[in-house]
Amino acid sequence: GQNIDQPTEMTATEGAIVQINCTYQTSGFNGLFWYQQHAGEAPTFLSYNVLDGLEEKGRFSSFLSRSKGYSYLLLKELQMKDSASYLCALGRTNDYKLSFGAGTTVTVRA
Amino acid sequence: DARVTQTPRHKVTEMGQEVTMRCQPILGHNTVFWYRQTMMQGLELLAYFRNRAPLDDSGMPKDRFSAEMPDATLATLKIQPSEPRDSAVYFCASGPRTGEYNEQFFGPGTRLTVL
């Protein structure tokens, strides 16, 4: 089985930075995904890490340490529209499905 | 603009009625997933298909739920009989043909309410 842990909620101010941590335990690791889900909408893909290190995409960055079973999603220059749930998900080799964490609800305040 | 489509977007029904949800995956994607999302349980995988063959339906209550892919452009999820506890948002997602990369693309979901 797989264990995926991420905080339930986080609150931050517009313009600030927020880091969402995700820790996991799995076998046959084949990538760590981050999805964003706005209330009432479908999850949308944000980032993918399969090797250790930092992947940067504009205001969003994702980091992975496979040896520590740890990833984080960094949101910079927060905007009100970034208020959403952020889901950490694991892929495994020879298995097409993803296992999702419970999600972290981020609230951005003015 | 390739997207996963789902119908209906909303469904309200009474307990005991049959519910059928439909999904059209992105053209060329050969992996299709059905998820259920509630506030209490989060996003749960119900079943998934690869090249139209069911690979895993262990997350699905077998006595009332069934999932099929009659052809490559249509996946269905059926609940018969429906119960109030089935009220949730049901998402379909599809994945690209290249198996090295597990990214999934989600449809808009079907919001089901069983009274």
Image (tube, coloured by chain):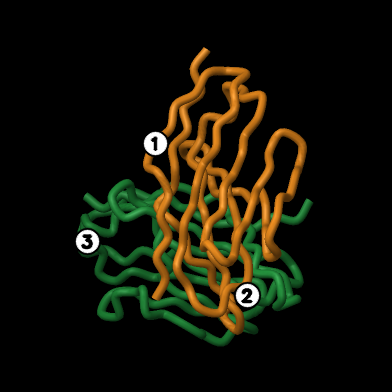
Chain colours: A orange, B green
Q: Is residue B52 above or below residue A50?
A: below
Q: Please give the chain letter of the residue carrying mark 2.
A: B
Task: Tell me the amino acid under the disc marked 2.
Answer: Thr
Q: CA distance from mark 1 to mark 3?
A: 31 Å
Q: CA distance from mark 1 to mark 2?
A: 32 Å
Task: Tell me the amino acid under the disc marked 3.
Answer: Glu
Task: Tell me the amino acid under the disc marked 1.
Answer: Glu
The percent coordinates of residue A74 (x first, y second) are 61, 39
Q: Residue at x 51, y 85 (%)?
A: B55
Depth check, front residue: B18 or B2? B2
Q: Please give the chain letter of the residue carrying mark 1.
A: A
Q: Is residue B43 above or below residue A86?
A: below
Which residue carries the number 1 mark? Answer: A9
Q: Residue at x 74, y 76 (%)?
A: B97
Q: Is residue B37 left or right of residue B102?
A: left
Crowding at dot 3, Cα within 10 Å, few <14 / some 14-19 / many 20+, comes out as some
Q: Secondary structure at mark 2?
A: strand
Q: Is residue B69 left or right of residue B41?
A: right
Depth check, front residue: B97 or A65? A65
Give me the disc on residue B31. 2
